[in-house]
Image (cartoon, rainbow, N blue to C red):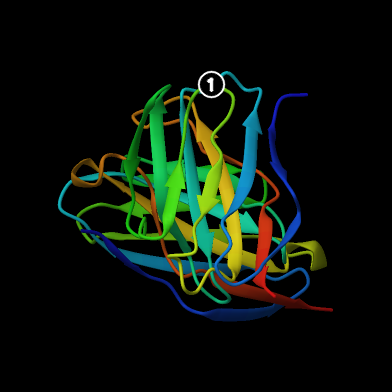
């Protein structure tokens, strides 16, 4: 079955540490997205990528970085510059950003500070 | 930019019908989606409206009025498993067509 796999499910970060969240999809989708979700809040866009080797900042990109070296993979790095990283991180994909087809989401990674 | 308003919480009993409203502000409306998210889980797609009117998918229906910048999700024959958060999301030509999500409505279904 096709889908999106995020790992790990839970992640803990120490002060001053960078951590990387994995996102892999086998849906052959061109577009991939990273969202942050805080308790009782909606999803806020961090970064998105329409095609390999290209990505764009979303609404809250500061303190985060991404890469898109392969169509299937879109890892997110939470850097030490992100002072409030505790949140639920969701990766999504879609055929492309113009399509009416829906976004498909992974099961998320819950990041906490040690 | 875009902004959306939806109620923070709605409660109902099993078997009832509930409507979750969503109003939005956008400069180049392209479509309105609804997603369901159970606690700690992945959002899952429910419906999409690009044109005015009602879209029906089983027990769930979604309505859009572009002139009123308003939509709603209608859930019929409520079941306990429908207890979840429901998000409306608007796509805007000015926002690169990427959905902007509302804060979500927590639906609590009582027996």
Query: Which residue: 65% across, 69% down?
Result: A14
Residue at x 43% of width, y 21% of height: A52
Q: Nearer the viewer, residue A29 or A7?
A: A7
Q: Residue at x 51, y 60 (%)?
A: A36
| Towards the viewer: B21 or A76 | A76
Question: Based on the displayed image, in which of its 4 quarters is residue B1 positioned?
Answer: bottom left
Q: Quadrant of residue A105?
A: top right
Indicate left or right for B93 with B36 as reference.
Answer: left
Q: Is residue B59 left or right of residue A9?
A: left
Q: Measured along the vertical axis of the image, is residue A111 above or below residue A98?
A: below
Q: Is residue A99 visible?
A: no
Chain letter of disc 1 in the image:
A
The residue most toward the left is B27
Quadrant of the rendered image containing residue A62:
bottom left
Q: Residue furthest front?
A: A16
Mark 1, residue position: A70
Residue occupying the point 61% across, 74% down: B106
- Asked whether residue A108 appears in the rendered view, the answer is yes
Residue A64 position, x and y percent, is 44, 54
Please tell me which residue lies in front, B88 or B64: B88
Residue B111 placement, left or right of A99:
right
Tell me where residue B75 appears, x and y as whole percent. 62, 60
In the rendered view, tell whether residue A22 sits above or below residue B21: above
Q: Residue furthest right?
A: B111
- Give SS at disc 1: loop
The answer to whether residue B30 is above or below residue B110 is: above
């Amino acid at each position: 079955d096709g889908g999106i796999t995020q790992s790990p499910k839970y992640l803990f970060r120490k002060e001053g540490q960078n951590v990387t969240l994995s996102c892999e999809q086998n849906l052959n989708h061109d577009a991939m997205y990273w969202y942050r979700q805080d308790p009782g809040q909606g999803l806020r866009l961090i970064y998105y990528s329409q095609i390999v080797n290209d990505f764009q900042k979303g609404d809250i990109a500061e303190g985060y970085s991404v890469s898109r070296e392969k169509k299937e993979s879109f890892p997110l790095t939470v850097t030490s510059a992100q002072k409030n990283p505790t949140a639920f991180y969701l990766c999504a994909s879609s055929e492309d950003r113009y399509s009416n087809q829906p976004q498909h989401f992974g099961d998320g990674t819950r990041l906490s500070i040690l | 930019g875009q902004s959306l308003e939806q109620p923070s919480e709605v409660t109902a009993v099993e078997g009832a019908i509930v409507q979750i409203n969503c109003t939005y502000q956008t400069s180049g409306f392209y479509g309105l989606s609804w997603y369901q998210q159970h606690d700690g889980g992945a959002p899952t797609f429910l419906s999409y409206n690009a044109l005015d009117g009602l879209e029906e998918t089983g027990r769930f229906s979604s309505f859009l009025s572009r002139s009123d910048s308003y939509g709603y999700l209608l859930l019929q024959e409520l079941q306990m498993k429908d207890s979840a958060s429901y998000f409306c999301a608007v796509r805007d030509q000015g926002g690169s067509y990427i959905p902007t999500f509302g804060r979500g409505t927590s639906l609590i279904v009582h027996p």
